[in-house]
Amino acid sequence: KQEVTQIPAALSVPEGENLVLNCSFTDSAIYNLQWFRQDPGKGLTSLLLIQSSQREQTSGRLNASLDKSSGRSTLYIAASQPGDSATYLCAVSLGSNYQLIWGAGTKLIIKP
Amino acid sequence: EAGVAQSPRYKIIEKRQSVAFWCNPISGHATLYWYQQILGQGPKLLIQFQNNGVVDDSQLPKDRFSAERLKGVDSTLKIQPAKLEDSAVYLCASSQNLADTQYFGPGTRLTVL
């Protein structure tokens, strides 16, 4: 059974720092991996999607990497800003229905 | 482009009552999902539709939960009767097709007293 783990559960850093969020999964037979952002009282917003054949994806200050063999992904946020404060979730897609299996998320607080 | 719409945004009911949630996906999206998200956890898929057919409902508690997607567009999720442990945020998402990026609505926060 696929399990997705995110460590740490919460992270607080000063504005301007670069930071890394971690995601690990137990079964490497995934179709893709996605990183989402969730703001309080709002739905989820897709940030980056990495296909299983890819190693990384970049969007602005965000860079996500994927190492299928070790079952790990990282989300790198450069030059963090208070507006980056949110909960970040990773999810892996697998099976014939491409079902998403989710981690519990990392709550990120950027201090001004 | 309009996003995924959900209503109501908040609902408070007493246990053993019934409740229904509504979702309108992005126009043209064939796949629709209902998730349950308990505080501090990631979303759990309850049911997945492809057009108006059910693709996966393996985690839907069918003794109390039901869902339908008439005409392959809007969808409703119903709980009858509700239990205390059903308190959660219910998220609806849609995608163009099975393997595509999912777009989420704002969710319905359900509190069962």
Image (cartoon, rainbow, N blue to C red):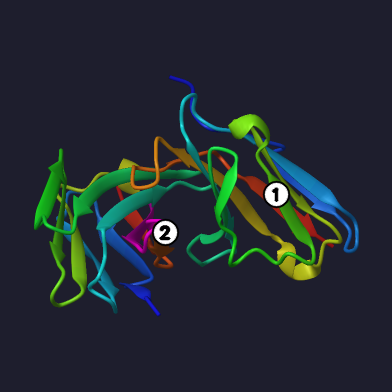
Q: Distance between the residues labelled 2 and 1?
A: 18 Å
Residue under label 2, please give it: A99
> Subunit of mark 1?
B
> Could you tell me the amino acid type at mark 2?
Gln
Which residue: 52% across, 66% down?
Answer: B40
Nearest the viewer among A4 and A39 is: A4
Which residue: 17% across, 49% down?
Answer: A16
Nearest the viewer among B96 and A18 is: B96
Quarter where residue B47 is shown: bottom right
Residue under label 1, please give it: B67
Residue A42 appears in view? no
* Residue B24 position within the rendered picture, expressed as x and y whole percent measured from the top left: 60, 31
Looking at the image, residue A6 lies above or below residue A40: below
Inspect the magenta stretch and tell me whether residue A96 lies in it: yes
Q: What stretch is highlighted in magenta?
A: A86-98
The quadrant the N terminus of chain B occupies is top left
* Residue B33 position within the rendered picture, expressed as x and y whole percent measured from the top left: 53, 48
Query: Dot 2: few (<14), some (14–19), or many (≥20) neighbours within 10 Å?
Result: some
